[in-house]
Structure formats: C-alpha cells, structure tokens
Image (tube, rainbow, N blue to C red):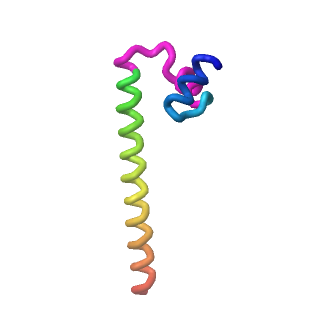
Amino acid sequence: MGETADLARKHGISEATIYNWKDKFCGMDVSEAKRLKALEEESAKLKKLLAEQMLDAAALRELLSKKR
C-alpha cells in the first residue's frame, strides 16, 4: 500500500480527506494555517449566533402574531 493509504488507515480517515487537506493547506506556512483555523472558528461562532438570533426573531414574530 502507499504511504497515503497507510496514513489514512492509521488515523481512521479516508485517503480523500488527506488529499483534500493537502489541497487546502499545501504551501501554507504555520502562521497562515493557524490564521485560517482561527477564521474558520470565528465563522462557525458567528453562524451559530446568527442562527440563534434568527430563532429569537421568529419566536418574537410568532408571539406578536398571536397577540393581534
């Protein structure tokens, strides 16, 4: 087996995942990869906050429509 297949099996991930990571991170230095990870984490937090706000707004609209 190839090195990629061995690595994938060892860590319980698919070879495709390794190739996707390689495409995404190849050529980045450590600081760029850390910055990308921080931005992805911030994006996830903001998406969660947006979803919560949308649920709150929907609940308030429903409450207002029942009071009319």
Seen at 53% across and 26% down, the residue is 21
Which stretch is magenta? 17-32
Q: Nearer the viewer, residue 61 or 13?
A: 13
Q: Quadrant of the C terminus?
A: bottom left
Instruction: Say which residue appears at 40% left-offset and 86% top-offset.
Output: 67
Residue at the extreme right: 1
- Residue at image position (36%, 53%) is 49
Examine the structure image and report whether residue 31 is included in the region drawn in magenta: yes
Splitting the image into 4 quarters, where does residue 57 fall? bottom left
Task: Tally the marks.
Answer: 0
Reply above or below: 61 against 4.
below
- Give percent across and percent down for residue 47: 42, 48
Q: Quadrant of residue 58?
A: bottom left
Q: Is residue 43 above or below residue 36?
A: below
**Residue 51 rendering spot, x and y as whole percentages:** 43, 56
Residue 35 point in image, percent of width and height: 36, 25
Is residue 12 left or right of 54 when viewed as pictured?
right
Q: In this image, 2 relative to 52: left or right? A: right
Q: Is 10 placed above or below 52 here?
A: above
User: Which secondary structure class fits the magenta region best?
Assistant: helix
Q: Position of residue 1 (x, y in %)?
A: 65, 19
Residue at 34% across, 18% down: 31
